Amino acid sequence: MATDVILPVLGIAQDTGKVVQWLKAEGEQVTKGEPIVEVETDKATVELEAPADGVLTGLAATAGDDVPVGQVIATILAPNEVTHAKEMPLAQPSVVPVHDAQDVSPPLENQRANVSLMPPSRLASRIADEYKVDLNLVAPAGKRIQKADVLAYLQNQQHTEQIDSATNRTRVVTASPKARRLAREQGKDIAMMKGTGPDGAVLTADVLATLIPVSPLQAVEDELVVAVPPVEKVPASSNGSSGLSLSTTWRLMAERTTQSWTSVPHFFLVREVRVNRLVAWREQILERSSEKVTYTDLLIKIVAAALRTHPRLNATWSSGTIVLQEDVNVGLAAAVEEGLVVPVIHRADELSLKGIAKQRKDLVSRAQAGKLRPQDLQGGTFTISNLGMYGVDAFNAIINAPQAAILAVGRIAERVIPVHGQPAVESVMLLTLSCDHRVVDGARGAQFLDSVAKLVEEPLGLLE
């Protein structure tokens, strides 16, 4: 049977993904697990793999297109289906013109009488059930009703109105779901904002840029998906300055960090730890192993062990509830040209040090080459950000929401500290733990940081 290639959701609040390039052409044979398309998301550029063996067909997006998540972007046909498709003529789908955002599309039974439509996708059906939408009123763009078709229908039915003082006419104010949600949380009237998105749509950045809160608008949140437009280079001003062209990854990283910083109640715990034994441990490993083990690898191993004994730090904040995660999946903040990405080492507490080093090397190299896969970015429960290699002593990291905490790691430096009442030169490192106070209180955060510090100062504790 035919298998759909669906644009996956890679982030909690991700709306769209941009098709960078197709790695396989229309009608080309593909193998399950083989990369077929590169997609730029709010986290990174990733490769989507073929979900089945067969022939790639029905490419619904071209390079540069922004596609809503959950939408079918291609189909993989089995050999017998390819033969059948060649024998059967394709029916031309009907297109229902929309003349005004106030119009309600008429029933489509008569229009569908001469068109052989496939059943709606499961995601489209689920959204339709949630919003009480009659699928007979939805005009499909192709031969099957997709999520984007239902959202387009909702866009026309659910909107915010405002009277334009200049023309005394009612205008439609559209906004992304994230923008509407953020506006409600901050008590801002979205109808009073000037949107910078396509057709004047209000984006998250527009909400954040509105500094004076007004009475919140009581409106039902629609599921309008607005693609993030590319940022054009700002023309040079009179003093010769100009703006930079930003990637989607960088633009949305700015949105996410701003939202996390303004909506998550951060608090910070700092601990200085002696690392003489950690340094000696690494030197011994390098003498015995062909795999290059870094201090980051050692910290991932230590943090994963500590998370297993402190499950409250291995949790996420979701819809007003604390969700404890079963797996310990440690994300590693990595800087790439397009911005910051956080590839994830899954079940890090179950991996050997050599296994962690191998995965870390593979993930970082593919992140820098823009070859990450969707699964490489999903499921993180805790994040480590290490800037020690840049000579940074200490810093406060912004939490990678909805995770509960992030550990910031500074450089290893020699300092004079008291040892048994006498001054001594020791190698030390500063660790800064950023915590979400909704999930973790000061005592729990301190206990976790103490466990990490003890394992750094005496790595043999990992054997217990």
Image (cartoon, helix red, strand yellow):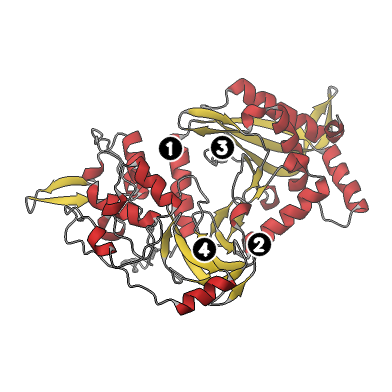
Which amino acid, mark 4?
Val
Left/right of residue 458 with respect to residue 118 in the rendered view: right
Q: Residues within 10 Å of mark 3 (few under 14, many from 20)?
A: many
> Which tag, 4 or 2, sits closer to the chain's start?
4
**Amino acid tagged 2:** Arg
Which residue is labeled 3 in the image? 403
**Vertical side of 89 occupied by 440: above or below:** above
| Kind of residue sitting beneath label 1 | Thr
- The answer, for residue 228, to whether it is visible in the render is yes
Residue tagged 4: 39
| Position of residue 419 in the picture relative to residue 53 (left or right) | right
SS for tag 3? Answer: loop
Within 10 Å of disc 2 (Cα), the crowding (few <14, some 14-19, many 20+) is some
Which residue is label 1 attached to? Answer: 262
Could you tell me residue 132's position as x and y percent? 31, 42
Earlier along the polypeptide chain: callout 1 or callout 3? 1
Residues under labels 2 and 1: Cα distance? 32 Å
